[in-house]
């Protein structure tokens, strides 16, 4: 990777495409954007209002978990849709399977009993499990299109995304650094803030990977 994925996103021809340019379905890309924005909005609302009361606390944190699950589900749509455009059977299998798993995970996370801090590791594990389900279609896509340079580059970005999510989950579960100095990071620098930084960085990496696949599908140089 010769340039940052932020620069990749900013300069992508997809974002500056004219109305008369080659047609490419954009709804899978919009699904990801809507999912990401929904996740961040749910998270913002939860952080603002969860402290209101115990009832609000459990309701809004379950809303937050739902937003995370939605973002993970929506992240699969664009790369799978474009990478398997010539293989509609596999595209349907992967998208329907991931959507079903995501739906079941959301139902599990909405259970009031799982909202307590005792199940923090379980929640992180479910999110990571959903994310790593993408290894199967990603491997399949690479095998199908290994001779295409753009697919290999997008795979690198997706690996970066997985690493960023994993590191963020590590801070979320271990509560580092506040567990070392309780009270010192209540305002700035605690694990949940670090977790969100890695989540946003991972989303940007996924954006870059998806845009590369979209440009490849349109026949544009990367």
Image (cartoon, rainbow, N blue to C red):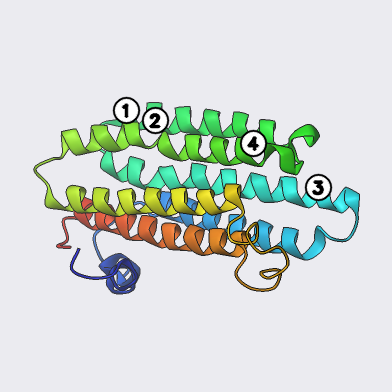
Identified at 14% across, 62% down, the residue is 221
Do the residues under discs 1 and 4 have CB atoms within 8 angstroms?
A: no
Looking at the image, tell me whether mark 1 or mark 3 is earlier in sequence order: 3
Circle 2 is placed at which residue position? 94
> Residue 151 appears at what percent x and percent y?
20, 48
Going from N to C along the chain, the mark reached first, 2 or 3, is 3
Q: In this rendering, does residue 155 appear at all?
A: yes
Residue 203 location, quadrant: bottom left
According to the picture, the residue beneath numbered tag 4 turns out to be 106
Q: Position of residue 11 (x, y in %)?
A: 28, 73
First-in-chain label (4 vs 3): 3
Q: What number is the disc on residue 90?
A: 1
Choose the circle earlier in sequence order: 1 or 4.
Answer: 1
Instruction: Name the residue rendered at 62%, 35% in the picture.
Output: 122
Q: Which image quadrant for residue 88?
A: top left
Point out the frontmost of discs 1 and 4.
Answer: 4
SS at mark 4?
A: helix
Q: Secondary structure at mark 3?
A: helix
Check contact, mark 2 vs mark 1: CB within 8 A.
yes
- Looking at the image, which is closer to me, 58 or 41? 58
The residue that label 3 is drawn on is 59
Task: Give yes or no for contact between labels 2 and 3 (Cβ–Cβ under 8 Å).
Answer: no
């Amino acid at each position: 990777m010769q340039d940052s994925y932020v620069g990749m996103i900013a300069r992508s021809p997809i974002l500056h495409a004219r109305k008369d340019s080659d047609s490419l379905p954009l709804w899978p890309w919009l699904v990801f954007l809507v999912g990401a924005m929904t996740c961040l909005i749910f998270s913002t609302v939860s952080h603002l209002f969860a402290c209101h009361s115990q009832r609000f606390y459990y309701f809004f944190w379950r809303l937050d978990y739902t937003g995370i699950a939605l973002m993970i589900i929506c992240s699969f749509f664009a790369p799978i849709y474009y990478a398997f455009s010539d293989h509609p059977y596999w595209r349907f299998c992967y998208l329907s399977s991931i959507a079903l798993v995501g739906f079941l995970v959301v139902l599990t996370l909405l259970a009031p009993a799982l909202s307590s801090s005792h199940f923090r590791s379980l929640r992180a594990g479910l999110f990571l499990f959903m994310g790593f389900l993408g290894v199967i279609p990603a491997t399949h896509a690479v095998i199908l299109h290994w001779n295409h340079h753009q697919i290999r580059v997008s795979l690198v970005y997706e690996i970066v995304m997985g690493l960023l999510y994993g590191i963020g989950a590590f801070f979320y579960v271990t509560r580092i650094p506040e567990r070392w100095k309780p009270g010192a990071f209540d305002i700035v620098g605690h694990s949940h803030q670090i977790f969100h930084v890695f989540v946003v960085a991972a989303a940007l990496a996924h954006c870059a990977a998806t845009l590369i696949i979209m440009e490849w599908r349109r026949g544009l140089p990367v």
